[in-house]
């Protein structure tokens, strides 16, 4: 049985609280389920979640409980994006949410959980191919892109996220990685101490967005 939430958002509250590039307001008025918020990676948008959304709906998850958060991936994880995500979560009106993040999306969502009070609201945090300990590939664009700088190994964001405990609070953490991921170097960067760390062979970086094997794992976690 999927976990239930007791609150829902109103359209007016959503419109008032949500701002920022690419951000659409959640619509939860008719659902009592814990919503799942899908967060895309760098140089992407919420359209990448079509296959996962279709899969979850097919498994019986109400479409209105599946939300997407869009953001400008060139902005600062800790100074801008985590706070905007916090406002988005608050605007849903839900007491608890689940988060599924791909790639760069893992960083602002982790910052929200660790430093923005999100551990009180996020039931499950799932990172798909996240640069949780940085990725050497980010050096290729770090000179002009803040999102890339945040993803470099040892960056301010990465070092603070992994300081003390990597998986704080009551939130349940899951990471999914692949040894074939060409964007996360090393691929073991995704795994976190204290998380359920899953490895699936043969997936390249964007294959996580279309893999039925990944989707099945996500659905199992959300159903707990």
Image (cartoon, rainbow, N blue to C red):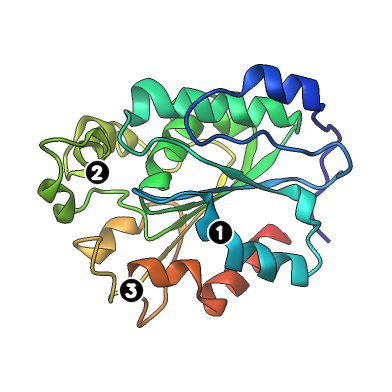
Q: Alpha carbon of mark 2 to alpha carbon of mark 1: how far?
A: 22 Å
Residue at x 56% of width, y 59% of height:
49
Disc sitting over residue 151 in the figure:
2
**How many marks on residues?**
3
Indicate the quadrant containing the N terminus: top left, top right, bottom left or bottom right. bottom right
23, above or below 100, in the image = above
Q: Nearer the viewer, mark 2 or mark 1?
A: 1
Residue at x 34% of width, y 67% of height:
205
Task: Kindly state the secondary structure of the residue where label 2 is placed.
Answer: helix
Task: Kindly state the secondary structure of the residue where label 3 is placed.
Answer: loop
Q: Position of residue 128 (x, y in %)?
A: 44, 60
Disc sitting over residue 116 in the figure:
none
Q: Position of residue 103 (x, y in %)?
A: 37, 53
Q: Nearer the viewer, residue 33 or 159?
A: 33
Residue at x 23% of width, y 33% of height:
146
Q: Position of residue 104 (x, y in %)?
A: 36, 47
Look at the numbered discs 2 and 3 and tell me whether their residues touch, using CB distance below 8 Å.
no
Mark 3 Cα shell of 10 Å, populated few (<14), some (14-19), many (≥20): some
Instruction: Determine which quarter of the picture holds residue 151.
Output: top left
Q: Alpha carbon of mark 2 to alpha carbon of mark 3: how far?
A: 18 Å
Q: Alpha carbon of mark 1 to alpha carbon of mark 3: how far?
A: 16 Å
215, above or below 68, in the image = below
Indicate the quadrant containing the C terminus: top left, top right, bottom left or bottom right. bottom right
What residue sits right under mark 1 in the picture?
49
Q: Position of residue 21 (x, y in %)?
A: 47, 31
Along the polypeptide, which appears first: circle 1 or circle 3?
1
72, above or below 196, in the image = above
Task: Return the residue found at the far top.
Answer: 16
Q: Nearer the viewer, residue 63 or 219?
A: 63
What residue sits right under mark 3 in the picture?
204
- For residue 37, side relative to residue 106 (left or right): right
């Amino acid at each position: 049985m999927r976990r239930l939430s007791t609150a829902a958002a109103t359209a007016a509250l959503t419109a008032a609280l949500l701002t920022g590039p690419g951000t659409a307001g959640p619509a939860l008025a008719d659902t009592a389920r814990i919503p799942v918020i899908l967060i895309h990676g760098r140089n992407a948008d919420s359209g990448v979640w079509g296959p996962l959304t279709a899969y979850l709906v097919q498994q019986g998850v109400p479409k209105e409980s599946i939300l997407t958060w869009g953001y400008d991936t060139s902005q600062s994880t800790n100074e801008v994006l985590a706070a905007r995500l916090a406002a988005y979560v608050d605007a849903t009106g839900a007491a608890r949410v689940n988060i599924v993040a791909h790639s760069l999306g893992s960083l602002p969502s982790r910052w929200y959980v660790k430093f923005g009070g999100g551990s009180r609201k996020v039931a499950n945090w799932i990172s798909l191919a996240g640069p949780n300990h940085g990725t050497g590939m980010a050096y290729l664009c770090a000179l002009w892109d803040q999102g890339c700088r945040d993803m470099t190994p040892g960056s301010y964001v990465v070092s603070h996220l992994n300081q003390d405990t990597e998986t704080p609070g009551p939130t349940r953490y899951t990471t999914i990685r692949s040894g074939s991921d060409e964007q996360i170097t090393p691929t073991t960067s995704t795994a976190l101490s204290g998380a359920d760390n899953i490895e699936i062979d043969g997936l390249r970086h964007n294959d996580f967005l279309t893999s039925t094997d990944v989707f099945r794992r996500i659905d199992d976690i959300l159903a707990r």
